[in-house]
Image (cartoon, rainbow, N blue to C red):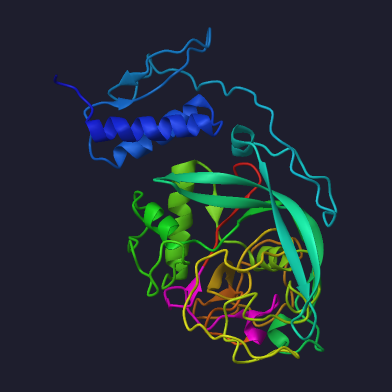
Amino acid sequence: MQYNVTVKGATAFAERFYRALGNKKVLTTSVSMGQDAMGREGNQWYRPVLYLRWSDQEGGQLFGNGQPDSDENKQPDPVRPKTSPKTPIKNPRDTTEIPQTKGQDEEEGLKQFSFEVVTVNRRGAIIKRENKQESYFTEHLGNAVDIEMVYIPAGSFSMGSPETEKGSDDRQRPQHQVSIKPFFLGKYQVTQAQWGAVAKLPKVNRELKPDPSRFKGEKRPVEQVSWYDAVEFCDRLSEYTGTKYRLPSEAEWEYACRAGTTTPFHYGETITSKLANYDASNTYAEEAEGEYRRETTPVGGFPPNGFGLYDMHGNVWEWCGDPYHRNYKGAPTDGSIWSVNDNKDDSQWLRGGSWYDNPRNCRSASRVSFFARDNFHNDIGFRVARGVGRT
């Protein structure tokens, strides 16, 4: 047979194509994702293509050589079928109505997950337990590797910390009110398994090491990645899914971390080594000293915050989209990335603290910028964000 598809290529296409259909993606998107999966198995004589006739919506050619049509034979864009998205659960902290999500969310639908949130006092004792639900969708990367994206509702909050908060400094002031649009944020820090899957995708702007981390483990967060590496990860994921992924802005990150709280930590007045991975040989309030693990831990091993996000305190620092600014004077109030900076070393803000840090650096308002964009370290990782719809 002169024109054929390899067994591996056909298998990769079929697996990705039917998985996409099973996840309620439209037919055209499913074919595109199958093509991407097939391309990762090497060059093929033929690749699956699909077009729909404009006149009667009839399914046309399913398999072809993938060459572009001439102008006179070029088919119009296929019509996207209408779907009925699921409506996210209304969060009581949300100040606006949760919208019917558009674009990719219509194809996938949103699911709900349940979790328990804990609150502690200054001694680190749990004084409250609360069962909650939030909405999310799953981005499938193949080979049983997924990224879960949690819906973060719109709202407003006071960004930064007051002078009376232990460990605060001028970098976290002046406190200012910020309004946040709804968006999605990774339920977990990007894992080494997720990194490995995306690192195999075609390059957008720069090469990515397939396994850069010091502390090995598929479920551990990826670390030793620069800001440029994190951006490349987002760009490749965007190309693969057809949806814009990015790093969160500082305001989005802090809003998501706080999840409606105003205390130093989303857990309350302090943290303990039973709640987060950090240097618990140092204390913050009146809690007892705890375990200093001296390495990362698998994501999701500690209780989540009020939005259902894990490891927002500790484990690895998380890159954000904002470049360095000395403080919050003149900061935007709409939650966007503050793109104009006043430094010359191209450093970026990091959030959340890490396994290496004392508790004051793990506070919701804590921010550091001691690394330039091309630097990396074994306590720095990230999580991904995206807007509602395809933006």
In this picture, residue 119 sits left or right of residue 300: right
Quadrant location of the N terminus?
A: top left
Question: Does the magenta run of residues contain 295?
Answer: no
User: Viewer-proximal residue, 206 or 134?
Assistant: 134
Q: Is residue 15 above or below residue 161?
A: above
- Residue 138 is situated, as x and y percent measured from the top left of the image, at 56, 45
- Main SS of the magenta part reads loop
- Residue 113 is situated, as x and y percent measured from the top left of the image, at 68, 49
- Residue 348 is situated, as x and y percent measured from the top left of the image, at 54, 74
Q: Residue at x 48, y 12 (%)?
A: 53
Specify the quadrant of the image occupied by residue 352: bottom right
User: Viewer-proximal residue, 62 or 78?
Assistant: 62
The mark tally for this picture is: 0
> In the rendered image, is residue 67 in sight?
no
Q: Residue at x 54, y 34 (%)?
A: 23
In this picture, residue 55 sits left or right of residue 177: left
User: Viewer-proximal residue, 270 or 347?
Assistant: 270
The magenta region covers 359-381
Residue that protrudes farthest toward the left in the picture: 2
Q: Residue at x 33, y 20 (%)?
A: 63
User: Viewer-proximal residue, 312 or 4?
Assistant: 312
Q: Is residue 265 above or below residue 386?
A: below
- Residue 189 is situated, as x and y percent measured from the top left of the image, at 54, 63
> In the rendered image, is residue 151 in sight?
yes
